[in-house]
Amino acid sequence: MTSINIGKKVVVLGTGGTIAGTAASSSDNLAYTAAQLGVGQLLQAVEGLSARLAGRTLVSEQVAQIDSKDMSFALWQQLALRVHQHLAQADVQGIVITHGTDTLEETAYFLSAVLPAAQQAGKPVVLTCAMRPASSAAPDGPQNLLDALAVVGTAGACGVVAVCAGTLHSALDVQKVHTYRLDAFNSGDAGPLGYIEEGALRLLRNWPLAPVDIGEDVIEKIATLKNWPRVEIVMNYAGASGAIVDALLSQAGAAPLRGLVVAATGNGTLHRDLEAALLRAQAAGVKVVRATRCASGRVLPTPGSAFPDSQGLSPVKARVALMLALMP
């Protein structure tokens, strides 16, 4: 078990989600409305919070109040800037972000890709969530919050990570894999970073390190970005055609298409009609990246591949990476 650091400030940023949701009945874990309680209310409802803080000061801030299915680029921009500003404070030990489960993996990857490497190397940013609303007879949010605080207080903790159901995942690997279970996330082939057990972290592998080339210039670009590069996702399947790709290219009134991520079958395979349409898009200046729709594994490049692979990123994370790569 790892030791606890004390005497610093922990910032909890609220964005809404199921963890802040309520339903008409405490027995209803489905027909709830997300993002109903403020982050301050969530923290007040957590038993044992003072003991877990171990002398640290807790500061909360409501950055947004949404169902995470409605996550937007503007909110990502706002969240990244608030995280950056808080991490820059010497007395801040780390940050916890309460977030909906639906797009948590995308937000986690986005933050890991834009926050300066120097900041990520020194302090953790921990996203946490819930699969049951706060009104549930047995909500999972309070324990997830306690576990997230335990991670922030762990000596050596760093990088952007996610905590759910007692398991610690890296932003690079975390994926939502179940629609209902409390343990809704996994880390695929890489496996989890560790487990939180009775308030202490059992670390299984090294803390995630941000690419060394992420400097202050990336967050500065994010701060002033007004028009995000338009990148869409298409999928390969039996009977796939090029109709969707062609429609995206010719869509009137929309921002020009800059990139396409294709969720290919198997090891990046594509129906010949879809591949032909993607080649037309590439010839028109659209950047095309191949990912796989498989839950585990990565696309291994083959000689003569027409499109670059996603370097192991899932389709939704590959889309985030491509958007960032296409920023002016």
Image (tube, grey):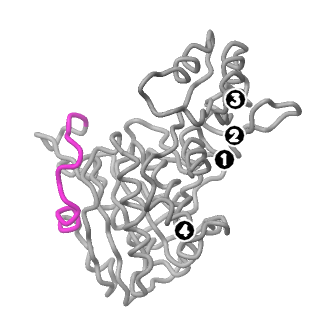
Q: Secondary structure at mark 1?
A: helix
Q: Secondary structure at mark 3?
A: helix
Given this view, does label 1 or label 3 mark the residue nearer the observer?
3
Q: Earlier in the sequence, mark 1 or mark 3?
A: 1
Q: Amino acid at mark 1?
A: Asp
Q: Which residue carries the number 2 mark?
A: 297
Residue stretch rendered in magenta on the structure: 30-44
Q: Quadrant of residue 40?
A: bottom left
Q: Which disc is residue 189 wearing? A: 1
Q: Is 162 colored magenta in this rendering?
A: no
Instruction: Characterize the local packing of mark 1: few (<14), some (14-19) or many (20 or more) Cα atoms within 10 angstroms.
Output: few
Q: Which disc is residue 282 wearing? A: 3
Q: Secondary structure at mark 4?
A: strand
Q: Earlier in the sequence, mark 2 or mark 1?
A: 1
Q: Nearer the viewer, residue 239 or 253?
A: 253
Q: Pointer 4 and pointer 3: residues touching (CB < 8 Å)?
A: no
Q: Earlier in the sequence, mark 4 or mark 2?
A: 4
Q: Pointer 1 and pointer 4: residues touching (CB < 8 Å)?
A: no
Q: Which residue carries the number 4 mark?
A: 159
Q: Pointer 2 and pointer 3: residues touching (CB < 8 Å)?
A: no
Q: Nearer the viewer, residue 144 or 174?
A: 174
Which residue occupies 78% across, 38% down? 300
Q: Earlier in the sequence, mark 4 or mark 3?
A: 4
